[in-house]
Amino acid sequence: MECEMPRVNSNREEMKKYFEEVKTIAVLGCSPDNTKASNHVAEYLRDVGYKMIPVYPKYDEILGQKVYRSLADIDVPVDMVVVFRKPAALDAIADAVIERGDVKVYWTQLGLINNSAADKVKASGVAVVQNYCAMVEHREIFK
């Protein structure tokens, strides 16, 4: 995939609104390795008061939370999905977000851009944030 610039994205004011409205955040690709960015972001989101749900293909627990193997396996409502996966995986993740029907915000971390996936998600009524770190943005907005 060539380098893409986000064609579909949210601004800082919209991000603030999302953070104020969501309660449950699924972190796809949440690593059990505490040296990885996904682990730091997930821990931060949990520590600032969100119900953080780690999604990872292995492990039963990460950061003291039950781990789910996929977005479809989560048995509680999910307000936001924060993605730490390769851009090629984002089309399938977009489909899973749409299929759930309860996700309000689809957020891809720094360096993760897939405009076709973002277009699909946005067309289904889900807000899109691409190529931003959820932890950095939250800290900046609520400092």
Image (cartoon, helix red, strand yellow):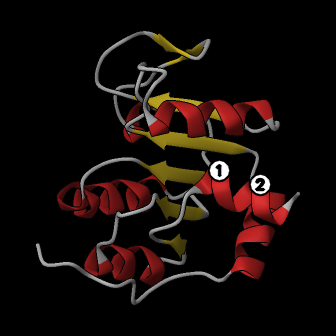
Q: Residue furthest front?
A: 35
Q: Which residue is mark 2?
A: 139
Q: Is residue 118 above or below residue 52?
A: below
Q: Number of marks in the image?
A: 2
Identify which residue is drawn at 52% across, 73% down.
Answer: 128
User: Mark 1 falls on what kind of element?
Assistant: helix
Q: Is residue 42 above or below residue 109?
A: above
User: Mark 2 falls on what kind of element?
Assistant: helix
Q: Is residue 61 above or below residue 117?
A: above
Q: Nearer the viewer, residue 121 or 58?
A: 58
Q: Is residue 119 above or below residue 19?
A: below
Whether label 1 touches label 2, CB < 8 Å: yes
Could you say where residue 40 lies in the image, as x and y percent from the top left?
57, 33
Q: Say which amino acid is labelled 2.
A: Arg
Residue 112 lies in what quarter of the image? bottom left
Q: Which residue is mark 1?
A: 135
